[in-house]
Image (cartoon, rainbow, N blue to C red):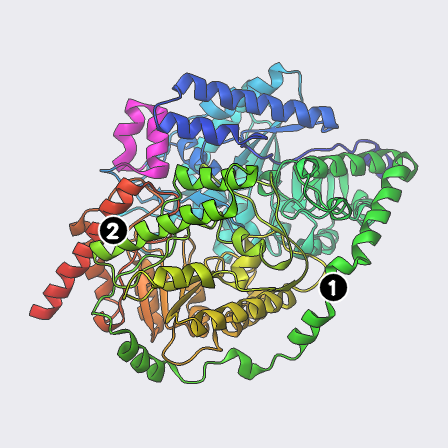
Amino acid sequence: MTTESAAAAARATVYGYPRQGPNRELKKAIEGYWKGRVTAGDLRATAAGLRRSNWRELAGAGVQEVPTGDFSYYDHVLDTTVMVGAIPERHRAAVAADALDGYFAMARGTQDVAPLEMTKWFDTNYHYLVPELGPDTVFTADSTKQVAELKEALALDLAARPVLVGPVTYLLLAKPAPGVAADFDPLTLLDRLLPVYAEVLADLRAAGAEWVQLDEPALVQDRTPAELNAAERAYRELGGLADRPKLLVASYFDRLGDALPVLAKAPVDGLALDFTGAAAANLDALAAVGGLPGKRLVAGVVNGRNIWINDLEKSLATLGTLLGLAGRVDVAASCSLLHVPIDAALERDIDPQIQRWLAFARQKTAEIVTLARGLAQGTDAIAAELAANRADLASRANSPITRDAAVRARTGAVTDADARRSQPYSERALAQRAHLGLPLLPSTTIGSFPQTGELRTARADLRSGRIDTAGYEERIKAEIQEVISFQEKTGLDVLVHGEPERNDMVQYFAEQLTGYLATQHGWVQSYGTRYVRPPVLAGDISRPEPMTVRWTTYAQSLTSRPVKGMLTGPVTMLAWSFVRDDQPLGETARQVALALRDEVNDLEAAGTSVIQVDEPALRETLPLRKADHAEYLAWATESFRLSTSGVRPDTQIHTHMCYAEFGDIVQAIDDLDADVISLEAARSHMQVARELAAHGYPREAGPGVYDIHSPRVPSADEAAALLRTGLEAIPAERLWVNPDCGLKTRGWPETRASLENLVAAARTVREELASS
C-alpha cells in the first residue's frame, strides 16, 4: 500500500473505554447485587446497557472500530483467568455453583475462602487480580463472555474488535499458587496455554470477528532472552493458525525495546504501539527494524493516561512519519481510556480557561477522530480544530496559573541537609521508645476508619446547605469521639482519629493546596467498585494554612495514648492525581514535599509525637524500564525525606505502602529513612517481611495481618499465625501489628471484629514471647 493510500485508509479506534457509566451505574448495580437489593438479571441488564451506550457513543463520535471484551464487572485480568479456566482450587466449588457469585468470591473472598491477591497494573493506579498458577494447572477455554459481547456490538451494525489480555502478559503477571514452590515460573505453562487461546480465537472468528487485539504490555518491561523467545514462540504459533481472525498485538505504557523486532517479525497482521512520553522512542525503533510493510499499525498518539489536551500538530507529524513505515496506519489513544474520567464538559466548577486544557475520554475520542480525519484528508480538513488547539496550548503555556515565583524560589533554595534527619535511626529509636513507652509488638491501624453513610450524608448536607459548617463539624467531632473510644476499649496502642472529614486521601489535601483543582465528576476505577476522583495538578504548589492539625489535636485531647498525624506523601500526591506534564515530575514533587514539610512541623509543634506520611504509590510509579529507575528513585525518596526531616529525634515518622510488588524497591524503602513502615502482607503471606529481612532492613515494620480489601473477618488465630511468620523475618522489638491498609471501605461490624482479633493476636504472641 502506498503512503497516500495508507493515509486514506486511516481509521479511528480505541482499546477500551471507562466501564462505570456517567453516574457510576455499574458500581451501584454491583454493590446492590452484593447487598441483595439487585438481582443477577438486573445487574446483567445494567452492564449490557452500559456497553451499548459506550459503543454507540464511540461510533457516533466517529470511531470506526469499537472495542469489545474490555468491559468488566471487576477486572479484565480476572476475566482472562475465567476465560482460560485457571480457577484456583479453593474457588472452584463456588464458581461451579454460581458463576457470577464465584467470580466475585475470587475478587473479594468470602468469610471462609481468601480472594486472589491484588496488585497494581504496571505503573498505573488500577489494580488487577493476580492469577495463581502451578505445575498442575489445567487450562480450559471459556469464551462465553468474549463471544457474547462481540455479538452484542455486531448486532448494532458496528465494526468491532475483541480485546484480550495476551498469553505472554497473562503468564508474566501470574504468581505461583499457594503451596507451589516460590521459584515456579508460570511462563513454563505457555505451551499448555496457547491451545486455549487458539480455541478462543476460533470461537471469536466464528462469531464474526475480523480482528482480535491481544494486549502484551508486559513486553515493554525489561525482558530476558527466554521471555522474548516465549513471545516469539507464542505469536509464531498463534499467527500460524489456519482458523483465526486477523491478529493485532498491542503494547503500551512504555517503549518496546528488544521486544519490538520480535513482534515486528511475527506472523501477525498488525501492531498497536504507544508513541507518547518515553514510548515515543518506538518511532525510531520501528524505523530501525524496517517498519511493518504490508501490515496494520495502530498508532497511540493521544495520551490515554493523563487529562491534558493533545498537541494535534505534533501528533500529525508523528503520524505522517509513520505512514512510510506500515501498510496502513490507524489512530488511537496510547492505551485504554479506562484510566481517565468520562467527560470534562461535565465539570462546571473549573475555571473555563483551565477547562479548555482538559481532555477526558470523550474529548480524547474527539482528538483521535480529528487526527484520523486529518491523516486521511489532509490538514485543511481539520484547519478549525488545529487553530483552536494551538490557541488552547498557548493559553496554558502562558498562564500565570501555572507559575508561582515564591514557590520556585523556595524549591531552588533546598539543600541536601534539608532532606536528612538530625540523628541516625539508632539514636532516634532510643529517644522514641523512651518518649512513647509502647509495648512489644505495638498495634495500630493505617489511618482511616469506615466512611459511613452518615458521614457521606453529612458532607452532602454541607454542600447543599442543609446544615452549616458548625453542624457539620459537630458530626465530625462525634465520629472522632466514637473512633477514639473504640480503639481505647479494643486495646490498640497507637490510635488514629479515623479521618471522617476526608473524602479521599489525595483529594482532601489537594483541595487545600494551591495549584490543585478538584473535579466533581472525574471518577476513575481503582479496583472493582472502588472509584476515585484524582485531582488535577495544574500549577505550582503551596500550603496556605494547616490542613490536619485541628482534627488531630482534637483527637489527641480525648486520649492519653499517642494519636498519629496522617498525611499523604508527595509521590502519592502526584501518582494519584493527573499531574502536570509541562515540567519534570521531580520538580513538582519537591513543591509538594515542602508544603507537607510545613504541615509535619505544625503537627509536631501542636504535640503530635507520631506522624505517618503515606507513600503507597512509591512502587507503582517506578518506571517500567530499569534504566529509568535511578533517576526516579532519587527524587522520589528525596521528596519524602524533605517532607519529614524537620522534626525532633523523638518524633516517630511512619510511612505506609500497599498492594504493589515491593521486592525490587527495598533499597528505596530503606532510603526513605522512616522510623516505621507498614505494608500490605496478608494476601502475599508475609512475602514483604522476608524481602525486608533479606535486604537487612534496619528499622521497624508492620507487615499487615488483616486484608482489608475483603469483607471476611480474619480470626485471632489467623492473625497470630501471620505474626509468627513475620517474626521469622523481623525481630520482635521491630515488629508492629496492623491491617494491610486503611479501613475506609469496610463496614463497622467487620472492622470491630477484625481489629479485636488483631489486638487479641498481638496479645497472644506477646505472651508467647514473654514465656519463651
What residue range appears in magenta?
A: 88-110
Residue on which the image places disc 2: 755
Q: Give the mark count.
A: 2
- Residue pictured at 36% horizontal, 32% vertical: 104
Quote the CA–CA distance across marks 1 and 2.
Answer: 46 Å
Secondary element at tag 2 = helix
Front-lying residue, 242 or 148? 148
- Residue pictured at 31% horizontal, 28% vertical: 95
- Residue pictured at 66% horizontal, 20% vertical: 158
Q: Counting other residues with Cα less than 10 Å from the Cα at mark 2, is it few (<14), some (14-19), or many (20 or more)?
A: many
- Res. 329 in view: no
Q: Amino acid at mark 1?
A: Arg
Residue on which the image places disc 1: 403
- Name the chief secondary structure element in magenta: helix
The image quadrant where one finds the N terminus is top right
The verdict on residue 93 being magenta is yes
Residue 731 image-quadrant placement: bottom left
Q: Position of residue 254 (x, y in %)?
A: 62, 53
Q: Which mark is residue 248?
A: none
Answer left or right for 618 relative to 296.
Answer: left
